[in-house]
């Protein structure tokens, strides 16, 4: 029964990673860049939600929406100011810029909100569901986290596959030149991608901070790296891959914490990544990149 | 009318197009022939706005194409079938065709054009739900052409449509190019298969390392000694 409980907690943590990883993988798939500031955008979302809940006393849903709005705008502005001018630049320049943006956001947050840790209020009422005559208890937060992750995944998949903009995004991911020939405004599609990826990061921020309530300017970095790992694990650029990678990563992390060692859990997570990449360099669901002849 | 004037295109330090001028009149088939690396594809990319020229101008009727962003060019009535087809391999045949009409709003006419494309290429209809990446080379070429037609262009640019196809398929593709032209669409055709291209062209230009070295009607160039020697294996 303990195992089942760990497994469910792992899925819950993995859900948060999965939502963050979706942002990473979408941006990579379409803009072909790693937005290493993604975790920090999430951090800003956490602060916005915190102030909305605590200082303005807004209810949960409007607070989350406000955080999503803030992250969406932030993501679009960052893309416009920092990444778009580098569209033709070598990928190393873009990568370094992204790391720069990450530090900028962290230090900006420190300046604005100080580096002292704040306590984030949980957005989900405390309490739990008791199963098997009380042997297995699952908190409401865990259930809500998993359900929201599934909902985000379904909405995103429908959006990408069914809508005109979603199809244009897929076209851009495959071949930007051909997309331009279709009349697709690639810059606009990249903006939309950043907007969506950053917006859903705010949801992850609120869920993460409800589970681990200490709010600090660096809170985005570790989950950011983990989510990046999850995205690579699942096959970067693939949306189901990010989902699967996130969930697996969460489960592996919690299980290794429970059964092996709390200190070594991160090392184990990254070791698993290395092993997967050695065996399958494109990640679990990643596609082979076929070279044009 | 499409009019290219003194076009210069550079890739870094390399001048790929060194000041070329040519025209494509409405209703004509015009071809640019030349060897690999002559600058044919670069010219096509410049017209469709995929690459910005260093100098010179490209006019489509009264619009200067070099002044507008690439993604707006297709709604001016100019579509391109790019070299190597470049269909969206992970999307179905029908999704590819729908993307061809991305810039259009006239839903009913789009539906009619889809039927027209399926009439023109019955094989695409058979395979409408199949992923484009699973099609054969010839079918992908048909899809790329159908996708361009879905933009309902007045002028259609074809970049090496015969590349890598069997002689039988090449004949089929060229017959369809003539049919499209008969339906009133202007055609700018870039080809290495000079013989075929000159046979259907109203007007032709020879492109050599970024310059136009010869021009004339399709017939004139086909019987020109220099062209025969260099491009027709004669």
Image (spheres, coloured by chain):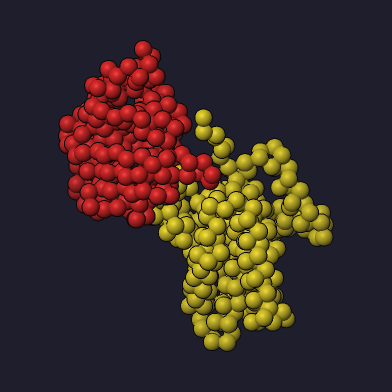
Chain colours: A yellow, B red
Q: How many marks?
A: 0
Q: Is residue B7 left or right of residue B180?
A: right
Residue B89 horizontal/vertical position (percent): 44, 37
Is B43 placed left or right of A101 in the picture?
left
The relative height of residue B137 versus residue A146 in the rendered view (above or below) is above
| Frontmost residue, A273 versus B40 | B40
Question: Is B25 drawn above or below residue A200 in the view shown?
Answer: above
Q: In the rendered image, is residue A142 in sight?
A: no
Task: Report if residue A93 is visible in the image.
Answer: yes
Q: In the rendering, at what x and y percent does residue B17 appear? A: 42, 40
**Which residue is at 53% across, 52% downward?**
A88
B142 or A241: nearer the eye? B142
Q: Is residue A127 above or below residue A269?
A: below
* Quarter of the figure with residue B96: top left
Q: Quadrant of residue A143?
A: bottom right
Instruction: Name the quadrant of the N terminus of chain A.
Output: bottom right
Query: Which residue is located at x 63 percent, y 56 percent?
Result: A93
Q: Quadrant of residue B140?
A: top left
- Residue B234 position, x and y percent, is 36, 12
Image coordinates of residue B179 in percent, x first then y, are 20, 29
**At 19% from the left edge and 39% from the top edge, which residue is drawn?**
B26
Q: Residue furthest top?
A: B234
User: Camera-side residue: A7 or A183?
Assistant: A183
Tell me which residue sits at (42%, 40%) in the image: B18
């Amino acid at each position: 029964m303990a195992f089942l409980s760990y497994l469910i907690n792992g899925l819950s943590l993995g859900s948060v990673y999965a939502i963050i990883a979706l942002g990473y993988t979408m941006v990579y798939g379409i803009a072909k860049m790693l937005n290493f500031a993604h975790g920090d955008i999430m951090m800003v979302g956490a602060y916005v939600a915190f102030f909305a809940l605590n200082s303005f006393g807004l209810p949960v849903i409007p607070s989350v929406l406000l955080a999503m709005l803030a992250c969406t705008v932030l993501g679009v502005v960052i893309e416009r100011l920092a990444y778009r001018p580098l569209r033709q630049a070598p990928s190393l320049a873009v990568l370094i810029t992204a790391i720069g943006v990450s530090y900028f956001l962290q230090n900006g947050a420190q300046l604005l909100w100080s580096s002292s840790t704040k306590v984030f209020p949980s957005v989900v009422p405390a309490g739990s569901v008791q199963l098997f005559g009380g042997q297995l208890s699952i908190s409401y937060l865990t259930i809500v986290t998993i359900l929201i992750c599934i909902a985000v995944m379904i909405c995103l998949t429908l959006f990408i596959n069914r809508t005109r903009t979603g199809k244009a995004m897929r076209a851009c991911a495959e071949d930007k030149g051909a997309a331009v020939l279709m009349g697709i405004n690639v810059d606009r599609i990249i903006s939309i991608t950043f907007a969506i990826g950053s917006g859903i990061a705010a949801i992850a921020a609120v869920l993460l901070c409800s589970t681990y309530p200490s709010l600090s300017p660096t809170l985005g970095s570790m989950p950011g790296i983990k989510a990046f790992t999850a995205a690579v694990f699942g096959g970067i650029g693939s949306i189901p891959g990010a989902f699967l990678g996130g969930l697996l990563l969460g489960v592996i992390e919690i299980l290794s914490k429970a059964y092996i060692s709390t200190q070594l859990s991160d090392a184990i997570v990254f070791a698993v990544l290395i092993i997967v990449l050695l065996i399958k360099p494109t990640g679990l669901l990643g596609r082979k990149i076929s070279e044009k002849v | 009318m499409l009019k290219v004037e003194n076009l210069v295109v550079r890739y870094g330090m390399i001048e790929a197009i060194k000041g070329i001028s040519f025209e494509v009149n409405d209703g004509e088939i015009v071809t640019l022939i030349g060897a690999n690396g002559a600058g044919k594809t670069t010219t096509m990319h410049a017209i469709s706005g995929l690459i910005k020229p260093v100098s010179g101008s490209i006019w489509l009727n009264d619009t200067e194409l070099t002044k507008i962003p690439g993604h707006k060019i297709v709604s001016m009535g100019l579509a391109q079938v790019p070299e190597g087809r470049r269909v969206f391999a992970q999307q179905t045949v029908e999704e590819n065709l729908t993307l061809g009409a991305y810039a259009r709003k006239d839903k009913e006419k789009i539906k009619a054009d889809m039927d027209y494309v399926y009439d023109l290429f019955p094989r695409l209809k058979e395979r409408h739900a199949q992923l484009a990446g699973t099609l054969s080379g010839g079918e992908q070429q048909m899809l790329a052409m159908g996708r361009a037609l879905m933009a309902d262009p007045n002028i259609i640019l074809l970049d090496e449509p015969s590349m890598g196809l069997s002689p039988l398929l090449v004949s089929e593709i060229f017959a369809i190019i003539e049919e499209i032209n008969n339906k009133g669409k202007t055609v700018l055709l870039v080809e290495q298969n000079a013989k075929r291209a000159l046979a259907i062209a109203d007007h032709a230009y020879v492109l050599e390392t970024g310059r136009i070295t010869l021009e004339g009607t399709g017939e004139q160039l086909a019987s020109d000694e220099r062209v025969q020697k260099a491009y027709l294996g004669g």
